[in-house]
Image (tube, rainbow, N blue to C red):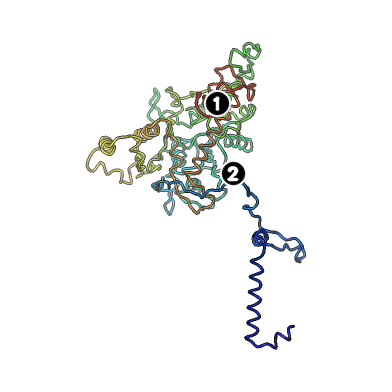
Amino acid sequence: MAKQIMRLSVRSRYRLILLGLVTLIIWYSLLPDEYISESSAQYPWSVPDPDGNAAAVEMYEWDPLAAWEKPDAVLREKAYRPAPKPAAPVPDPFPLLSQNPPPAPRLLRAPEINRPPRRHYAEQTPLFVGFTRNWPQLLQCVVSYIAAGWPPEDIQVVENTGVMYANQEGRLTLQNPFYLNHTQLRMLGVNIIITPTLLTFSQLQNFYLRTALDLAFPYYFWTHQDVLVFSHENLTDAHGNRGPSLYTNAVRTLRHLISSSSSSSTTGSSSSSSSDDDNDKDGGRIRRPWAWAHHFFAYDHLALVHRDAVLAAGGWDAHIPFYASDCDAYLRLWWAGYAQTEGGVGVPGGPGEEVGLVLDVGSVMEDVGALLRIPGSRARMPRVPGEEEDANDDNNDDDDDQKEEENLWGRGRDRDRDRDRDYFESWERLVALGEKMRAAKYAGGNAGRNTWQARQKGGQGEPFYRDPDGFEAGVGMLIDLGRAVFAEKWGHRGCDVARMGVTGEDAWRLERDWDEETEGRGFEGGSW
């Protein structure tokens, strides 16, 4: 056959080849669709054996379209939601840290009045600061604790972003909600712990407990990242001496609780012989010698944890991801007979002000270096386009700010002192700004108090990118889910279940005290 083909003229050979191609096309077009779709979608790879020879095994690409096909499904044409409004870029919260060469370490210390002792207190005082979104908010929180005297080496920033090592490798940028600058935190002297994956709030609390076990911390402090703290620098004792720093007061509180617990375990408690009837009358609490689990300095905006007590009560319920998880954990500890105290050892004052000022804020001053009294760093109220007008509903804000500056700074040349490299902020001005930021956070009620979490809208194309609005929507759905789980667990919608005579043994055993058809679902209504 080959010899006969070779005897043909060149033109005849081309005609023969063309005829063969046409025959193949016609044959392929007559094949069944099922055969074509299956064969054309599969790409075999030969798997070499250890000796380098091709094995008999062939692998094919898995097809999700075929695997999840529902013959009766009705598929509609995709439709897009309205595009989100563009967000203003987030500015660098601490410009000095971004300079090259970096600032001298002496500039990044606490003001002299608040500096911790050169020799660390005998007690371990780790402070966990959890982070998921909004780097400027976290940096302001960390710097404020350093300025209030907390030793930087005791601060443990827990990166709970779910981006694995992308931040450590510098692969994210400032406009990404999950951006965290490891280099700048190291410059400040704090530690960074990266969670294995993205955790919910309750899982993060259990991660703190596990980390405390691994690092042998019998007690630890934790705080929220949207907190701004100050020591009571304006107070003096009868001899004119400055009062202790926020950190020193926190250590004194820890010492008091440890000594009280030790003396109680030594002397015993007559209440341990109480009858079951007494337990029922006291909300079902177990009677035990005095032992503590938590101390709240400003609820849990800053909290002190007795690790083993919380572990003895089972830790945090991971089925309740966010809101209501605190109610569940603190109630179970209360029912178990553990004390959870508040107040503090320090300066008398309102709740949360004994240890120092602990402010719940939702914005970031324009230069957080002012908290460290760095010369030339000026604290200003942040300007967030489209938000400040809504929060204050006041068209005269600029005029009010200018009048306030004139009162604080004077007129003429004195108002230019903020540009003088020798100028540094006063404690009074910083606290006034912090209180103004706290008021702005709640100006619209509780509805807008978490808007700071979704302020950054960038990061497209970066590792582990998540749509910021979609991430926020997902968290909101988990919040609803957690409240619904709490309601099913305790038979009531709200944290006030103890008033109903509910006890720790009642978990998952109670009927609902509401009708879902007429009163809504577990995360709606009730005492929420």
Q: Is residue 316 left or right of residue 402?
A: right
> What is the tally of numbered marks visible in this picture?
2
- Mark 2 nearby-residue class (10 Å; few <14, some 14–19, many ≥20): few
Label 2 vs 1, first from the N-terminus: 2
- Asked whether disc 2 touches disc 1, contact meaning CB atoms under 8 Å apart, the reply is no
Residue 516 numbered tag: 1
Q: Secondary structure at mark 1?
A: helix
Percent from the top left, x then y, of residue 408? Answer: 28, 35
- Mark 1 nearby-residue class (10 Å; few <14, some 14–19, many ≥20): few
Residue at image x 63%, y 12%? 270
Percent from the top left, x then y, of residue 475? Answer: 52, 38
Percent from the top left, x then y, of residue 447? Answer: 43, 32
Q: Quadrant of the N terminus?
A: bottom right
Q: Is residue 4 left or right of residue 406?
A: right
Residue 280 numbered tag: none
Q: Secondary structure at mark 2?
A: loop
| Of residues 221 and 494, the one drawn nearer to the viewer in this rendering | 494
> Which three-letter amino acid code belongs to the residue tagged 1?
Glu
Residue at image x 22%, y 42%? 412
> Which three-letter amino acid code belongs to the residue tagged 2?
Thr
CA gap between label 2 and label 1 equals 35 Å
Q: Is residue 514 above or below residue 15?
A: above
Q: Is residue 86 above or below residue 44?
A: above
Name the residue that disc number 2 marks: 197
To which quarter of the image does residue 332 belong?
Answer: top right
